[in-house]
Amino acid sequence: MARDRQRTERPRLTRRVVVLSLLGAASVTLYATLVPLAAVLYGTPLPLSFILAAAACGAPLLAITRPRWAIALSTAASFALPLLVPRELATEAPWPWSVPALLAFVLTVSVVTFRHGARLGAFPLVIGALASLTAPLLRSEVVSSAPVAANVTANLIVTASVATAAYLISALVAGRLRVAAELTREREHSALEESRRALVEERTRIARELHDVIAHSMSVIQVQSSTARYRLPELDEAAVAEFESIAATARSSLTEMRRMLGVLRTEDQTVELAPQQRIDDIPALVDTLRRAGVTVGLEITGPVADAPQAVQIAAYRITQEALSNAVRHAHGAAVTVRLQADAAAISIRVRNSPPEEVTETRGSGHGLRGMRERVELLGGTFLASPTADGGWEVTASLPFSSAVPRHPSATDPEETS
């Protein structure tokens, strides 16, 4: 069925194909009209009618790829056709421009202008108009009478006016399409840059996760293993050797981690040398927002200082991201932050009231996804949802059991990866 459907599908017509088809149809129609008209009504020899009509009506099609040849053919036709008309016939029909020849001339000017620009399009307009002016000068016997001279003048004025109008319209339309194409290219470039930025943010997020959780935990393992022989003097030589092996493996893993972080970080990122923020740094974060004019309430209860290092870092980052989302998407709303710790977990709740100004802007969801991934990494639960009064609430529970335990005698080294 799929193959049959593919066989029955018709090729889609592009705008270029449609325009070329219409231009070809117009040229063929003008040629079929100009040949008998020149031969019968204007008395032009039939062979010359075929040749000159082909030059005049083929010029628009040739102008697509060979504009200079098209200008030469159109000029030659506009110069020769009026000169071949007998005097008695020139006074009975529109002269020096017949209607099909005028339309072919206008079409040539339009195609050259639209396809190759206004500067080149001015050449067929000016040269064609000047070439048609030579007919009355060379055939003075045709314009000897005042009525015929008036008709000839009107014919030239109409031709010049219509061709000039076509030239201006073509130049304006071509300029408009070029601007639209440029805007499309800019949008595509912006979309490409946006995708690249999203990729960089994703790589940064991965590097942050590795840095905040894995690297810090490996540092703790390395410190605890290296100091075990001094903290636990009852260990035998086999146990000491085992701890030394664990420490060596941890140091090797940290080295590989640093190399991986160097690959993931972009050139404009600097290595973080300061210790990671913890729950004790949340009040300073809240004070920064308050100084910026945001109403933030903070409540921290329970033994939060006893939380493992990974939980401390995750709690700070989740609170930071939730506050950032509240400030970004709920302008003027009051925010409350509550952290409650017990012996097994820390509960986080960040809630904002309804915003003063409702906007339709929505984020890409990377912030919520990053918070959820942090929580899931520690085996906790995460929920972000609107409240009944139109606000927004983020809740997270971070258990201690899934985090790397802190040894009472081990200190937290500064992360230098």
Image (spheres, grey):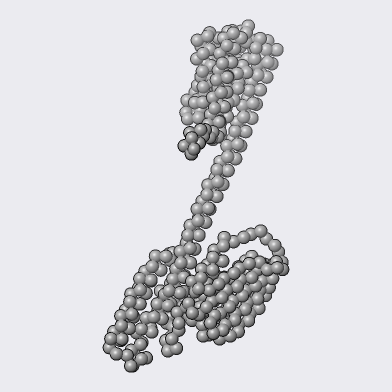
Q: Is residue 202 left or right of residue 295?
A: left
List x then y, in percent, for residue 54. Answer: 51, 18
Q: Residue at x 50, y 30 (%)?
A: 64
Q: Is residue 268 above or below residue 15?
A: below
Q: Residue at x 48, y 77 (%)?
A: 402
Looking at this view, is 192 or 111 the one in front?
Answer: 192
| Quarter of the figure that contains the C terminus | bottom left
Single out the residue that lies furthest toward the front: 1
Q: Is residue 145 left or right of residue 280?
A: right
List x then y, in percent, for residue 149. Answer: 67, 14
Single out the residue that lies furthest toward the top: 88
Looking at this view, is 339 or 378 the one in front?
Answer: 378
Q: Residue at x 66, y 22 (%)?
A: 158
List x then y, in percent, for residue 7. Answer: 48, 33
Which quarter of the picture shows residue 123? top right
List x then y, in percent, for residue 134. Answer: 57, 18
Q: Residue at x 51, y 28 (%)?
A: 63
Q: Is residue 387 above or below residue 115?
A: below
Which quarter of the picture shows residue 111? top right
Task: Say if residue 133 shows up in the picture.
Answer: no
